Structure formats: structure tokens, C-alpha cells
Amino acid sequence: MRLGNLDNRPVLISAAGSVDVEQASRGRFSADFAALYERWGDVRAWVEDADFAVSAQPFDTSALGNPVPAPRQIFAIGLNYADHARESRFAVPEWPVVFTKWPSSLTGPTGTIALPAGQVDWEVELVIVVARTAHQVAPERGWEYVAGLTVGQDVSERVLQQAGPAPQFGLAKSYPGFGPLGPVVVTPDEVADRDDLELGCLVNGEQMQKGRTGDLLFAVPELIAKLSSVATLLPGDVIFTGTPAGVGLGRTPQRFLADGDELVSYVEGIGTMRHRFTATEIRTTDPDRPHDPNNR
Ligand code: ZN
């Protein structure tokens, strides 16, 4: 099953087209994404029993929005591939490095992202969507708590990230648009091997990252176990699982995103996201304070 977002409404996506969840279920499921993830088991059972081919509508893939627009919690994992830990000059972690991206940084799988001052870098990641409340889950049951998988970019501004005596990931990765998700949420049964998927990203057509989720130091079920040993995971929460080698910070010479660059990000069996970066001035919500990129 593949769940997408068209006009801020949940839709089922197949080769035949899109099916509006609220309409096709005759209101049994609402058009609210948070409510849908809350009843994920019921949604799965309903989809398995129904035949939607006749009601599927053709749609424009570039119109797809963020399929997880309002998670209550966003977890993100740093240094979860050994080759990326090495290129970042950090030790390979013995426990996951956990931080958050704030929900206001989320955006859809296509569109334009404004570049703040500094060094803006790419991090393609497999992203988990949580299916049900999880606390103290054993690793062997981790996959039972996964609603689906999607593609994410953990876009990162490296100057602010390294501005303190210790790295501070959250704020430097939470500028508007720094958390694209999509193009769809795919249930794990739909991919070839849920434990080993190719992921990568390209800048202006040039491959920058290419890895496999089989190389995750803490794999999906282990992350559910580790995070839920402390926090309670809630339906519709998202977990950015970490990025493989090839980020701009780790390259020689270093390379960062510039005005006009196109970033294409993919995970095998899930889909592709496409974003354009622009240096155009960022709007401020304070009318008396024009945006000053050097004033944080
Ligand atoms: Zn990351």
C-alpha cells in the first residue's frame, strides 16, 4: 500500500492512479492524516479487502505533498552508517546519536527550498513512520510498529551545527523546508527487501550519495527498540534513520548547496524527491525586522 497527499488529503496511490481515502471509505476514515495514522491497522485491513481500480483517478506526481504533514514527534539519528561517521570524523557510535528536527521544517517531495547563510548540506535518509504507540518494544518485534517507509532529506546548515562547544543538530537542521518527506509512504511489504534498500542523492545530476540501508549500524527494528526504551513513540511519528557517506561536509574539497542547485533524493522501491534551492531572501514574520541572514 502506498499513501500519498494530494491537496492535503490522504490518497492511495497505485499504477491505476489515486483514490481519495475519505471518499472511497464513505467517511469511515477522515481526510486528516494524524487521525489516519492513529487507525493504521483498520486502514490496512480496509485496503486489503477493497478493490479500488475502478475509482482510481489519474494524477500529476508533481502535485504530491508531504505524506506525513503533522507528526507529533520527529526523531533523527546521527552517524548511523560507519562510512558517514568516518567522513564526519566522529567515532562509530555504540548507542544511537538521537536528535530532533522541529515539525515546522517539514515540506513535501518537490518544490523550492530557501538557502539561509552558511553551508547547506544534503543528507538522504530512509524515514520510518510509526504505526502505533510503542514503549519498550523488543528489537525482534520492531517492524510490527512500522506503518511505512518514506524518503527524507535531513538538510543541514553546517556552520550553526558546529557553532558551539559540542555539535548541536536540532536547530541547524530545522530551517523552513529542511525536512522534505515523500513522495509516498510505502508499507514494508511493498519493497523488495525492507532491511536492505539502496538510497542516494544527486546534485545537478551528479551522484553525491549512494548507500544501502543494510549498512545501517542500528537497523529499523533496533531503532524502534532503542528509542522506545526511553521515549513513547506515537502513531504518525517519524524517524529519520541517518545518512550514508557522501555529504558535502565530508568531501575534498567540501561542497555545499548553491543558488539554483537541484537535489534529487531517492530510496529504492519508495520513490524520488526533487528540490531546487534558492538564495532568494527569506520572508520574516516580523514586519519591522527585515531578514538578516547574518543575525541569528
Ligand atoms: Zn541526518
Image (cartoon, rainbow, N blue to C red):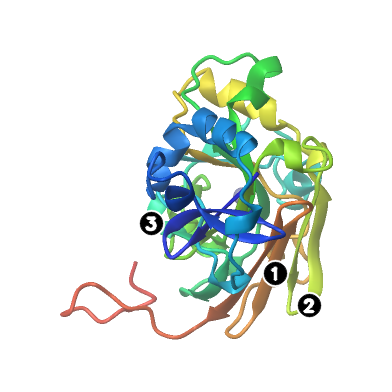
Residue 26 percent across, percent down from the top left: 41, 45
Tell me the tag on residue 104.
3
Q: Is residue 285 above or below residue 107?
A: below
Image position of 143 with respect to 207: above or below: above
Residue 292 in view in this figure? yes
The quadrant where residue 59 appears: bottom right
Residue 186 as seen in the image, left or right of residue 234: right
Mark 3 vs 2, N-terminal side? 3
Residue at disc 3, secondary structure: helix
Amino acid carrying mark 3 in the image: Ser
The kind of secondary structure element at disc 1 is strand
Q: Quadrant of the C terminus?
A: bottom left
**Few, some or many residues within 10 Å of mark 1 (<14, 14–19, 20+):** many
Up the image or down, 168 lies above or below 45; here it is: below
What is the crowding at mark 2: few (fewer than 14 residues within 10 Å), some, or many (at least 20)? few
* Element carrying mark 2: loop
Label pair 2/1, CB-CB below 8 angstroms: yes
Look at 56% across and 78% down and name the residue there.
Answer: 277
Q: CA distance from mark 3 to mark 2?
A: 28 Å
Residue 80 coordinates in the image, percent (x, y): 70, 39
Residue 72, image x, y percentages: 38, 40
| Three-letter amino acid code of the residue under disc 1 | Val
**Disc 1 target residue:** 264
Question: Is residue 227 placed above or below 58 in the rendered structure?
Answer: above
Q: Are marks 3 and 2 in contact (CB under 8 Å)?
A: no
